Image (spheres, grey):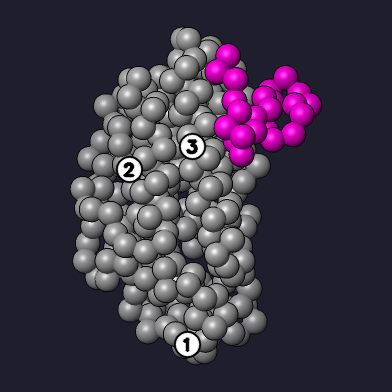
Amino acid sequence: MKIVVSGASGLIGSALVPTLREDGHEVVKLVRRDARADDEVRWDPARHELDPKHLADVDAVVHLSGANVGGRRWSDSYKRTILNSRVDTTQTIAAAIASAIPRPRILLSASGVNFYGDTGDRTIDETSPAGTGFLAEVCAAWEEATRPAADVGARVVNLRTSPVFSQKGGLLGPVALLFKLGLGGRLGSGRQYMPWISLRDQIDAMRFLLTADDVRGPVNLTAPEPVTNAEFTRELAEVLHRPAVLPVPRFALRIATGDFADEAILAGIRALPTVLLEHGYSFHDPDLRSALRWALQR
């Protein structure tokens, strides 16, 4: 295939692009500066500018752009940045797909498992309704922005991605460092469920979805065995051979991170990857220990 990728320099994109090329696909990256190579195309999503001609001979678009949700404390202006960085980019790509002749057949568009909000210990899958809260509203608007592509017949898949365990960056980097320093512990009560996925499953699931012609709509990119934060804490401590005796109280998390604590750290999301499993995807890391050992090279 010829595949256009946005967000190619991020954690997921920087792993996806070389993998797609190894598979034999031609990959073109969307960049916000002047193009410097034959495999780059300039766009300006803040102005909703992407010339449809750049998608006219493309088979698929993988859209991964969006500001870092956990990169800083949420002010009102940064909340707008989080929302706009997702909706503006998605609207721009969906409109270009709708206008391209011929148009791409496939759009894999990033979303988040936070679509469901705080669901406590209730098991959920792709048939579950949208939740409440800022991140749930962002994910709903993010997915709605793909509609122009779906309306013209593109197979749109909304990638409801979980926090990613990676050998380079992602969730585990700062957390593992704290544990290695003997400062690890559960967050809040530890009873909240936390969805997760290893980076290699994230990438391979996306490769799988590029050719799964009967899959469209939301797909949970999350491992089939969600765990509580307390279970994650114990498992990580065992893999690293470090103690986990310093729990971080709820009030301290709220002081440190504000609304992010309630929506992303203390919220429980017990999500299952029902669509992937029903369509035959086989996980490299279905359980937490195998994912941690792979990501931490243990």
Comparing 163 with 131, the one in front is 131
As drawn, the residue found furthest toward the top would be 102
Left or right relative to 182: residue 162? left
For marks 1 and 3, give the one nearer the viewer.
3
- The residues bearing labels 1 and 3 have C-alpha atoms spaced at a distance of 36 Å
Task: Determine the secondary structure under disc 3.
Answer: helix
For residue 119, above or below residue 92: below
Ranked by sequence position, the earlier of labels 2 and 1 is 2
Left or right relative to 100: residue 133? left
Q: Give, as a three-letter code, the residue at label 1.
A: Phe
Q: Position of residue 173 (x, y in %)?
A: 61, 65
Ranked by sequence position, the earlier of labels 1 and 3 is 3
Name which residue lies at 68% across and 27% down: 42
Task: Determine the secondary structure under disc 2.
Answer: strand
Name which residue lies at 54% across and 55% down: 80
- The residues bearing labels 2 and 1 have C-alpha atoms spaced at a distance of 34 Å
Circle 2 crowding by C-alpha within 10 Å: few under 14, some 14–19, many from 20: many
Question: What label does residue 251 carry, if any?
Answer: 1
Q: Which residue is mark 2?
A: 219
Comparing 209 with 255, the one in front is 255
Q: Quadrant of residue 13?
A: top right
Span shown in magenta: 29-53
